[in-house]
């Protein structure tokens, strides 16, 4: 066990939260804001000490009971020298954890900045954290980023929130050249046609 992990466990214990190691932190079903603050305080150093420790601590934030300031996570995602796979994990945390409003940052990353390996990990967060008021707004944005980010990550929210009216866009993207992509698009069209109901957006940002 590294020095940073020990220090985190000590501070958590002093705050009334007893854990044997970081794995037990991850295993807990919820984390109160006091715990989240301590984890975020040491997270950059935890990553430096051991990538696995940092990753476990970051993912534990997904079950925070209250929205928290994600500035530490965003700085690690944007500015650290962590590898792309690790940043992909941080992107997932930013997508699913309850945070303060990151809608502008998230949309800018996906629409305007250079496409990186980890970029697509932000897409699952768009429905709840992208700042969209209606399904139509979300679908319009997904269509804007199609050429940059078409992947399983992109398909999930489109399939969930699209209606029959949104199939025309998908048909326009069938090119007969990329057979694999065309097959995925055709599967998506079929899934939308077979949907029993249309899902409605729920927001998680504050």
Image (cartoon, helix red, strand yellow):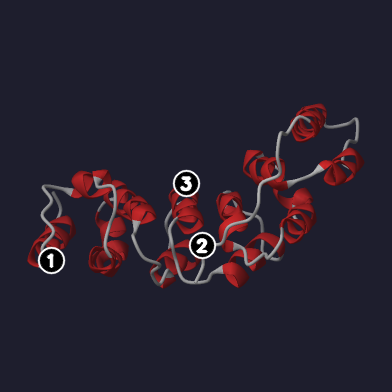
Circles 2, 1 touching at the beta carbon (< 8 Å): no
Q: State the image quarter where residue 163 is shown.
A: top right
**At 44% across and 66% down in the image, what residue appears?**
99
Judged left or right of residue 86, residue 165 is right
Q: Is residue 161 left or right of residue 66?
A: right
Q: Residues within 10 Å of mark 3 (few under 14, many from 20)?
A: few
> Mark 3 or mark 1, which has the lower sequence index?
1
Dot 3 falls on a residue whose secondary structure is helix
Q: Give how far apart the Cα atoms at labels 3 and 1 are.
A: 29 Å
Q: Residue pushed farthest front?
A: 197
Quick one: label 2, few (<14), some, or many (20+) residues within 10 Å?
some
- The numbered dot on residue 85 is 3
Whole-percent x, y for residue 3 in the image: 13, 58
Which-is-in-front pick, marks 3 and 2?
Answer: 2
Q: SS of the residue at dot 1? A: helix
The quarter of the picture where residue 18 lies is: bottom left
Secondary-structure class at tag 2:
loop
Pointer 3 and pointer 2: residues touching (CB < 8 Å)?
Answer: no
Residue 77 in the image: x percent, y percent? 47, 62
Q: CA distance from mark 2 to mark 1?
A: 29 Å
- 46 over 196 or under it: above or below: below
Sequence-earlier tag: 2 or 1: 1
**Residue with the mark numbered 2:** 204
Residue in front for this viewpoint, 28 or 38: 28
Kindly identify the residue that appears in the image at 81 percent across and 29 percent down: 186
Q: How many marks?
A: 3
N-term mark: 3 or 2: 3
Image: 55 above or below 65: above
- Location of mark 1 (residue): 11
């Amino acid at each position: 066990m590294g020095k940073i992990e020990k220090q985190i466990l000590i501070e958590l214990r002093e705050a009334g939260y007893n854990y044997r190691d970081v794995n037990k932190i991850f295993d807990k079903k919820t984390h109160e804001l006091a715990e989240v603050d301590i984890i975020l305080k040491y997270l950059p150093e935890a990553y430096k000490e051991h990538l696995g420790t940092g990753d476990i601590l970051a993912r534990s934030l997904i079950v925070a009971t209250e929205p928290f300031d994600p500035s530490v996570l965003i700085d690690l995602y944007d500015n650290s020298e962590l590898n792309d796979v690790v940043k992909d994990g941080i992107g997932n945390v930013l997508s699913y954890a309850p945070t303060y409003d990151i809608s502008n940052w998230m949309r800018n990353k996906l629409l305007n900045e250079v496409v990186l390996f980890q970029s697509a990990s932000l897409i699952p967060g768009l429905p709840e954290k992208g700042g969209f008021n209606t399904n139509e707004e979300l679908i319009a944005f997904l269509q804007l980023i199609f050429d940059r980010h078409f992947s399983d990550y992109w398909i999930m929210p489109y399939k969930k929130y699209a209606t029959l009216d949104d199939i025309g866009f998908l048909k326009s993207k069938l090119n007969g050249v990329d057979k694999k992509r065309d097959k995925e698009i055709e599967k998506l069209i079929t899934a939308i046609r077979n949907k029993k109901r249309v899902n409605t957006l729920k927001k998680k940002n504050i």
